[in-house]
Structures are given as C-alpha cells and as structure tokens.
Amino acid sequence: MSTLSKRSTVYFEPAIHNALKIRAASSDSSVSELIDEAVRLLMREDQEDLAAVRARVDEPEISYETLINSLEADGKL
C-alpha cells in the first residue's frame, strides 16, 4: 500500500499517460508512485548539480571572449 499523502492534478499527453499506465501495471506500482519516483530522481539530480556548483565556487571566472581567444591562440579554432 502506498504511503503517499498529498494530492495533485497532473496533465499528460495521451500517449505518455498510456505508457505510464502500462509501466505501472507491469511493475505492480501506481501511476502516482511512478511520478513520485521520477520527481525524486529529478530533485536528486538538482542536488548533485548544486553541489557541483558549490564545489567550483572558488574557481576563477573567464569570459566567453577570453575563452574563444585562448582557443584560437592555441590553434583549436
């Protein structure tokens, strides 16, 4: 039995909704459980991205123009 406790309305394209229903049936899950899992995965990815940004906060910044000029000077462009 699911432990999900909040309700929300989500709209899908019909083909996506059908795929979700089939996936839910074949994995003995509900559509809600699949969506909850997908959102959690998305949030974990966001957490990883934010951690990567924090880890690089002390790196020196370089402008796009400087980068392009450097690549050209190195013969890479």
Image: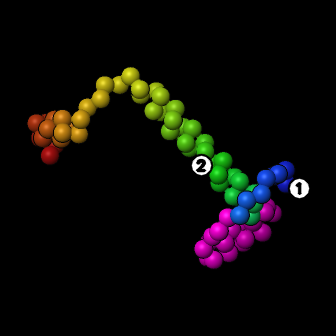
User: x, y percentage for residue 51?
Assistant: 52, 32
> Which residue does the image show at 55% across and 42% down from the upper left?
46
Q: Quadrant of the N terminus?
A: bottom right
User: x, y percentage for residue 67?
Assistant: 21, 37
The amino acid on which the numbered mark 2 sits, given as a three-letter code, is: Leu
Please check the rendered image and state whether residue 16 is part of the magenta-colored stretch, yes or no: yes
Direction from residue 6 to residue 72 in the image, left or right: left
Q: Point out which mark residue 1 bears.
A: 1
User: x, y percentage for residue 40?
Assistant: 66, 47
The amino acid on which the numbered mark 1 sits, given as a three-letter code, is: Met
The residues colored magenta run: 10-30
Q: Is residue 71 visible?
A: no
User: x, y percentage for residue 10?
Assistant: 67, 64
> Which residue does the image show at 63% across and 70% down from the upper left?
12
Query: In 3D space, how far apart are the residues under numbered discs 2 and 1 (Cα atoms)?
Result: 24 Å
Please check the rendered image and state whether residue 15 is part of the magenta-colored stretch, yes or no: yes
The residue singled out by tag 2 in the image is 42
Direction from residue 23 to residue 13 in the image, left or right: left
The dominant secondary structure in magenta is helix
Instruction: Label 1: state its secondary structure.
Output: loop
Q: Residue furthest top?
A: 58
Q: Residues within 10 Å of mark 1 (few under 14, many from 20)?
A: few
Q: Is residue 20 visible?
A: yes
